[in-house]
Amino acid sequence: MKKQIKGNVSKTVLLLLAAVGMVFGLTFYKYSTRPSLSLEDLQKMGTVVFKTPRSFQMADLTDHNGKLYNSGNQKGQWTLMYFGYTFCPDICPTTLSQLNGMDKQLKQDNLNLAQQMRYVLVSVDPRRDTVEKLKGYVPYFNKDFIGVTGEVKDIHNLTVQLNVPYTPVLNPEDEFYLVDHSANLAIINPAGEYHGFIRPPLEPAKLTRIMTAVDENYRR
């Protein structure tokens, strides 16, 4: 009888230990797979992620190497798209420098994500930003950055779809005109959809945390 009771107690203890282990394992899995920042956290950091990513159309544009750039180039990786121009005196070079800083930090902290990132400057001043002009400008900040130009109407149509306000300059009085434009970054997901946007300020450490969390949320 004592042996039977002892055996039953042992089985009960083992079952309890197994149950506790299962609960611990599930709890650990839950917290270990939780994104580093929630969507609410991201919003507080100036990042809006859409509940349902939005499809958009992109006409054939041209990159700074003279190659075709369109919707097909958006798929298979994350793209941070910035709308600016080479004659911009301050915001554009600052933003590209910040993106370069983000690229460097991601390569240290999250190489896998860094290899899935693309950074694109779409010119809102195609009148002056020829392929040659972009080729001499964009790689200065980072050799892997992409500069894109095209027809004014096609670029304007893209900005409307991605909620990027800017004022096209069609008949400038001189060659030193400035172009009013947004400083937001449009986030394009690996499916080629408009995923959300990031508002300034755009410090490298902040951008690294944001895109790491955006990627984690996307893959859950």
Image (cartoon, helix red, strand yellow):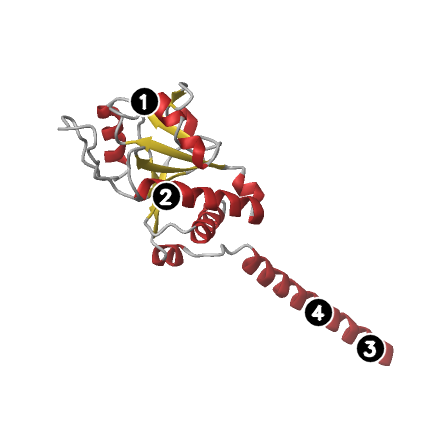
Q: Which residue is mark 4?
A: 17
Quick check: 125 left or right of 192?
A: left
Circle 1 sits in a helix, a strand or a loop, which is it?
loop
The one nearer the camera, 136 or 204, is 136
Q: Dot 3, crowdedness within 10 Å: few (<14), some or many (≥20)?
A: few
Residue sitting at x 39%, y 24%: 64
Residue sitting at x 42%, y 30%: 146
Label 4 vs 3, first from the N-terminus: 3
Question: Which amino acid type corresponds to the residue marked 1 in the rendered image?
Answer: Thr
Q: Tag count in the figure?
A: 4
Label 2 vs 3, first from the N-terminus: 3
Residue sitting at x 86%, y 77%: 3
Label 4 vs 1, first from the N-terminus: 4
Q: Which residue is mark 2?
A: 95
Residue at the bottom extreme of this rendering:
2
Up-down relation of residue 50 to residue 22 (above or below): above
Disc 2 to disc 1, how far (Cα)? 20 Å
Quadrant containing the N terminus in the rendered view: bottom right
Q: Which residue is mark 1?
A: 130
Disc 4 to disc 3, how far (Cα)? 16 Å
> In front of the other: label 4 or label 3?
4
Disc 3 to disc 1, how far (Cα)? 85 Å
Question: Which amino acid type corresponds to the residue marked 2 in the rendered image?
Answer: Thr
Determine whether label 4 and label 3 are within 8 Å by CB: no
> In front of the other: label 2 or label 4?
2
Question: Which amino acid type corresponds to the residue marked 3 in the rendered image?
Answer: Lys
